[in-house]
Amino acid sequence: MSSLSSLALFSGMTAADSAAIIAAGHRRMLPKGEPLFLHGAPLTTCYLLLDGAVRQCRQTPDGKEITLGLAGAGNLLAATHLFDAVDSYQWSAYAEKPSEVVAFPIPRFKQLLVAHPALALNILAALSQQAHLSAVDAEHRITLSAAQRLACSLLRICTLHRLNPQHFALPYSKSTLASTLGMEGETFSRSLKKLASLGVHVRGSQVEIRDPHALECYVCGHCSIADDCTTLASLHAGACSAKP
Amino acid sequence: MSSLSSLALFSGMTAADSAAIIAAGHRRMLPKGEPLFLHGAPLTTCYLLLDGAVRQCRQTPDGKEITLGLAGAGNLLAATHLFDAVDSYQWSAYAEKPSEVVAFPIPRFKQLLVAHPALALNILAALSQQAHLSAVDAEHRITLSAAQRLACSLLRICTLHRLNPQHFALPYSKSTLASTLGMEGETFSRSLKKLASLGVHVRGSQVEIRDPHALECYVCGHCSIADDCTTLASLHAGACSAKP
DNA sequence: CGGATCTTTGATCACAGTCAAAAAGCGTGG
DNA sequence: CCACGCTTTTTGACTGTGATCAAAGATCCG
């Protein structure tokens, strides 16, 4: 990794400290599609994702799969289990792209938490933010249509990856994105169609959002947390705007 | 309150310590229907619910209300905001029944956290558990039908309130329960009908679950976290079984 | 070029939301 | 004890959305 210090997990820490923490784990490459851990397996290790992407999911007894979320570089995986009183993984994690992780035995990582209070605080902040996001997500599933959720997701992708909404490539396959949004591939495809009238044009993985503001009106006017939406805030701040 | 020590928040602490914590806040009675705090208001206070029930909810700009959850005695309200970096409440809270709360100014409460590490750990455990529950809930909304979610909720009510499934009274109005489950009153009513064929009989607020095990099969066979379901575990342990 | 996977399109269906109206509870006051 | 008005719950008819199944197009990669 070029810069560990850019990871939120290490914010407010010295380069020496973050390097020492990384050194306490084992680096490992994970080919695409490989599991990092499996639902129900004994809980031994938590992982810091340095590069790539990991999909976390769960299966019901009757065979349906639910995608819980997609983790990117800088995310800590199975972090909630540090404070949980469980002894097995509560879901599975698979590499969505070839990924690089650092594996920490959980007891070892707990020692690190004690030794580095800033690390513990960063993790708490991340967990809290994540809880926030999943609450927003749950609400979206109730109040928004599939097309609106898709639109929200497109905007979020732009801000998160610092992409230019006027022209960018989807960072994941459409079916992966669909499952992240909790919808079927067919619905995803049809929803994209609906957004065409709002100036969203798609060819393959290339996306063009003619008027991000129009999309925003289409979505955020129905969202109860629009006031505190980080995506919205950075859109307005021009974090991913093309026009200089 | 008869016994503070029975609250999960104070588990592992001396009676003197928990009394001292309580003494740091202001006790207050809240009549039914009154707001405890409102979405968007400046974040000043967190609350410990000693008795009664509080419904937490949010409104979308176009007027829909989403119930986030129902808190009972022993719950800490706005606790996530202790670790969040927000300065206003992210949702509203209203007394569902006449309730008794202890109000803590947030800076004061943070001091208490430092002074009583056990308190901080209990709160973390509660937050973690709550995150877990809301994840389960989100999944249920995707994978289960309204009738199945209702059945799950009935079983959970029995275990949580230590009620006898063969004969108990609903602790909240049907419309409140419906909104907790994220469904309309009409759907709730119709779903109750569907459960009749599984031995669930309702007259007014009196419920009779002839065969809890049958209900369990109806629900949990489709749930990906059935293995680790606390409701299920206590059902099997006979925590609320009538037969001695 | 050929085979595999991913995506789109079409047709159909089931579920829960909506609107409207009837029925059941419930507390109040005569 | 009953009649009254109010709220909550139930029932009915209808609608919209997204899931499902099936098949046709794209796209990718050897």
Image (spheres, coloured by chain):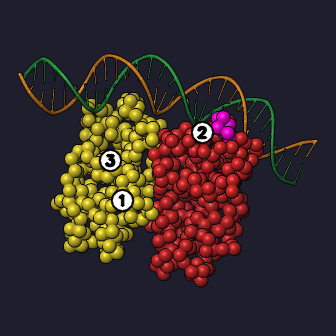
Chain colours: A red, B yellow, C orange, D green
Q: Amino acid at mark 1?
A: Leu
Instruction: Answer whether residue B59 is magenta in the image.
Output: no
Where A109 falls versus A204 (above or below)?
A: below
Where does the image place residue B155, in percent across and percent down from the top left?
36, 44
Marks 1 and 2 sit apart, C-alpha to C-alpha, by 34 Å
Q: Is residue C26 left or right of residue B194?
A: left
- Numbered badge on residue A147: 2
Where does the image place residue A213, in percent across and percent down from the top left?
60, 45
Name the residue carrying label 3: B55
Q: Nearer the viewer, mark 3 or mark 1?
A: 1
Marks 3 and 1 sit apart, C-alpha to C-alpha, by 18 Å
Given the image, what chain letter belongs to the residue carrying mark 1? Answer: B
Residue D6 image-quadrant placement: top left
By secondary structure, the bulk of the magenta-drawn segment is best described as helix
Name the residue carrying label 1: B43
Q: What residue is shown at x 69% (from left), y 56% (from top)?
A: A244
Q: What residue is shown at x 65% (from left), y 68% (from top)?
A: A50
